[in-house]
Image (cartoon, rainbow, N blue to C red):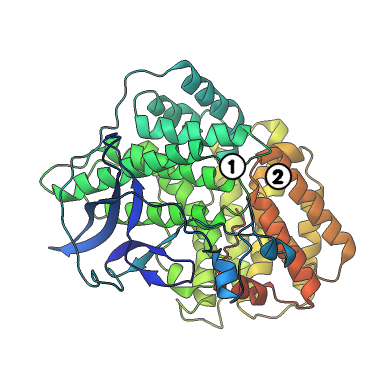
Amino acid sequence: MNLLLFEEDDNGQEGYNGFVIPNMDKDKGTGQAVTVINVAQQEHGIANLKIDIKREKCMMPRQKGKGCSICSKRRIICDLGQPSCQKCLGRGFTCPGYGPRLRWVQGVALRGHLRGVQFPIPESPASTSSPSVDGNAQQLLDYYDKNIAGLMVWIDSERNYYRQKVLPLAQTNEAVRLAICAVSAQHAARDFTPSTVYEKDRDHVLSMIMRGVDDMTAHPQLTVTAGTAEWMLSSMMVLSSYELAHAGGADAADFHRKAARALVNTLSTLDFPKSSLFGFLQNQLSMYDIFACTTILDATDVPDAIRPVEYGDDRSFSAYLLLLHDATLVSRGGLAQDSTRDWRGEFVQARGETLMEVGSSGVCSSADRGDLIRLVDAYHNAALLYTARCLSNGYGPKEIVSLSDLFRLLTGMENLRGWVHNLAWPIFMAGTECYGDDDRQLIVRDLYKSLSDVTGFKHHGDVLNFLETFWASGESDWRILAKQWETLGRRILAV
């Protein structure tokens, strides 16, 4: 399997341009950038991720008159408005902006004079270690500790490795530190206007990741260390939050998800000591990946999702996630549908396993136990509605009860602000099944307002925009509109 990171132009055409990122040598006079092509090769049964790095001219500013991709696909002239074109806003779309759109595909260069060609040009790996942290950076690290780390996990406890291990790693690793600082600086600005300062930090981190992967795969005789895997995956997971902190960031966040997936799938074929931090991050990616796949109608994106792994005594939600992904695979044609399979019975069993695992782990206080049970039950009922809709099992009395129970659970949380960041997917599923019900739609709007207020992640507003468009469409199946949006290059990321 070959993986290529490439750029689509604003006309939706696929072409070679790789992934252009700022020059890391800091030669102000060179005006160069680094273009990365990411190719996975099969050698002696081991999949190695090959990074070919080539020097090219620095990215030029966007040419005047080149509009956003949605206007291009609609075959209309973009008005080039800032920060978003008015033609998109007028139709209820979230303008994707005017920058390059990046995604992972199979193959090599697809057109142009470099079609079918791979260039293995070695490059010195960037240093990722830095012994000192200045005052401004430390303030941003502290901000992440107090305001963001707790939002990244289901239950914020002493086992939250974002706080216990990723933040300490940022003290010595420049890539992780820059990723966290970029997220914190952006998150702190609730009325966010895109800033090139944050984008430069993000691009700096991306260049380090790409060079790290290149160094790892270009020298197979060297043993991959746990530390290398940790800082690379930590940086990727943190950067996903960066993209979600502003409206229209789902596409860019989806790029990081696919990149992290490619990294984990490659590392899984290599022999290196997998640490508890790597296991934690892999499970974080698995939850993110599996829930993201539920709203992606592209069948080719679903099969390679990261599965949860066991590390230490943490097996929470793994049975539920594996079952949910099975339902997604069947609905996208990736698995044969067994008409005798009792999905409801399997989800009931997964619910019981989840409650037992969390209960025995001791991570939840007695005061939070009631809301934790409501959380698990909300996901349980949301999954029942999802499978009924996507597997065409019919929408009958049991589903009506599941929907009623889901709204009861969502509105019955005793400490909604403390748990709402975990409820994005159940809230979305509730929204997909309340078309024609003004009262329930109002509840969903209020829940999304709480989501945005508590998390500071503006992509939740994009998801609500999708639901409101769906409610006004007259359709009863949300997947019809989701497919239309996906055709326009718009991702729905209900996480």
Q: Position of residue 350 (x, y in %)?
A: 57, 58
Check the image and name the residue furthest to the front.
64
Residue 317 left/right relative to 31:
right
- In the drawing, what numbered circle is on residue 452? 2
Q: In the rendering, at what x and y percent does residue 448 appear? A: 74, 50
Compare residues 312 and 170 and report the one nearer the observer: 170
Q: Is residue 97 above or below residue 275?
A: below
31 or 351, which lies in front?
Answer: 31
Q: Position of residue 70 (x, y in %)?
A: 58, 68
Q: Secondary structure at mark 2?
A: helix
Q: Which residue is mark 1?
A: 154
Q: CA distance from mark 1 to mark 2?
A: 17 Å
Image label count: 2
- Residue 170 vertical position relative to residue 51 in the rendered view, above or below: above
Q: Circle 1 — which element?
A: loop
- The residue at the far right in this view is 439
Q: Residue at x 36, y 18 (%)?
A: 132
**Would you say residue 159 is visible in this rendering?**
no
Tell me which residue sits at (40%, 28%) in the image. Answer: 170
Using residue 203 as the reference point, say whether residue 398 is left or right of it: right
